[in-house]
Amino acid sequence: MPETLAEAVSRRRTFAIIAHPDAGKTTLTEKLLLFGGAIQLAGEVKAKKDRIQTRSDWMKIERERGISVVTSVMTFEYDDKVFNILDTPGHEDFADDTYRTLTAVDAAIMVIDAAKGIEPRTLKLFEVCRMRDIPIITFVNKMDRESRDIFEILDEIEEKLALDTAPITWPIGRSKSFCGSYYLTSNKVRGSDKEVEATQVNGPQDVANRLPENERAAFIEETQLALEACRPFDREAFLEGHLTPVFFGSALRNFGVRDLINALGDIAPPPRDQVADTRTVHADEDKMTAFVFKIQANMDPNHRDRIAFARICSGKLERGMKARLARTGKQMGLTAPQFFFASQRHIADTAFAGDVVGIPNHGTLRIGDTLTEGENLVFQGVPNFSPEILRRVRLEDAMKAKKLKEALHQMAEEGVVQLFSPEDGSPAIVGVVGALQLDVLKERLMGEYGLPVSFEMSRFSICRWISAEQSADMEKFLTIKRGDIARDLDGDPVFLAQDAFSLRYESERYPAIKMAAIKEYH
Ligand code: G4P
């Protein structure tokens, strides 16, 4: 029997991994992909080599600095489920990219280093997940090394994140004697990830025998305390984002990853409902809807193409189908949607709600765009964060001003930088969240457009999107402050302030004007 749409959708799990750099996100991602057979070890090495040869020059920045700049998606199947991992840049200078990616997932794995606990980036990324009530599964990694006390780690999650915890497994042993997971309530044990099935045991006493004699009593005491003192798992609370199930392991040494992937399949939610301007869209509706959360140019420099990453929110996307682009009302043909398996891409014939496809285009699609099979609706909530750094772009060859304008426009559409055109006609200002984005911009302008540029300080340092209940208030402000007003890529007005003091001063002087640090695309 062919699979129904509802069945196909319910098999999907779309998630991101959030972590402070070095906690083990990359290692865990690779191990998860290995489960799905998406990469073999030999192939992995080869893929890395290919990647280095084929990626465009600006990727040098990524290699030289050892950071991951590109957000990508990796799909694999395991145990009848389809997993889509949306990768996010680890470096905080690309935070806006990460935040946008988190709008496209249904769940997140939070990786914590067992010796370090909650670190600053973990906290920040967690806050974004909380804004969207994304359910979180916690993986306490590096149990093969010296770790903090387990109860202390759980307490820290509860206190720093205001998130209830429910340990599903308990680590058997620590550092050198760490040898697997004990399922607290179901009384099962799994040694390494090589063990497909967990083994039923009689109780902690049975498990303790796996440990050196001097550690046994402590293990029994701890697990008893955990059973008495820790919260039981409550799926409802997990799905609402109030409680996190906790697993322990070592991604490097292949412990606990199987527990994690089983949990993703069993308790993580299938594709969620998505809120649009006119109504809420359910994932198993027949008609296809999707939104674009990321644009990536020149993934393959031989083709100079531009890929829009779209999260399918409902229905089925079929190759060759026509979709309506909400922003323009125009139809576009989806002739070559692509799937991503580790580092390879494939043409996708069909994709379902929850999946992420890459749609090649020449600038038609922008971040935040909605695609539908005809219905006029727009998905809410792909955010734009106000830049932390504002700069003017200085061109060494003034004859190329027009080319620069075009190039900046394209970069802004891709989300590499934000572009603001001052109302008084002075040269455009670029805005970024982190300084590394400026390096990427500079390299790409040189590499792809042959434009050598440098950056100059702007007299402004803060940018806020402005709006008012009464259009008269807005018009008055726009006229009086003309020299400090610019338009973003969509033509929406922003107020540019020299510093925090002047921002505060002007907001107090013009209380009718709302000044927002985050703009949701619509
Ligand atoms: P990230 O993407 O979150 O930044 O972390 P990544 O996976 O790159 O891991 C950071 C370092 O931690 C790596 O070591 C990695 O091998 C190590 N690591 C990851 N998981 C575990 C674990 O479960 N146990 C132990 N002991 N180490 C782990 P590195 O020396 O920085 O890099 P490499 O040279 O080993 O690649």
Image (cartoon, grey):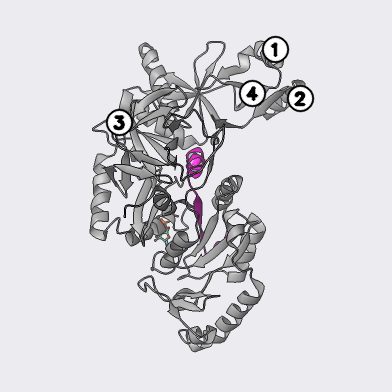
* Contact flag, marks 4 and 2 (Cβ < 8 Å): no
Q: Nearer the N terminus, badge 3 or badge 2?
A: 3
Looking at the image, residue 170 sits to the left or right of residue 180; the answer is right
Residue position for label 1: 476
Q: Residue at x 29, y 56 (%)?
A: 39
Query: Which segment did they paint magenta?
Result: 95-117
Q: Nearer the viewer, mark 3 or mark 2?
A: 3
Label 4 to label 2, Cα distance in Å? 14 Å
- For the residue pair 138 and 392, the one nearer the viewer reads as 138
How crowded is the residue under tag 4: few (<14 C-alpha within 10 Å), some, or many (20+)?
some
The answer to whether mark 4 is within 8 Å of ligand 1 is no
Q: Is residue 110 left or right of residue 499?
A: left
Local secondary structure at mark 2: helix
On residue 466, the disc is 4
Q: Which residue is mark 3?
A: 305
Residue at 67% across, 13% down: 475
Residue indicated by mark 2: 508
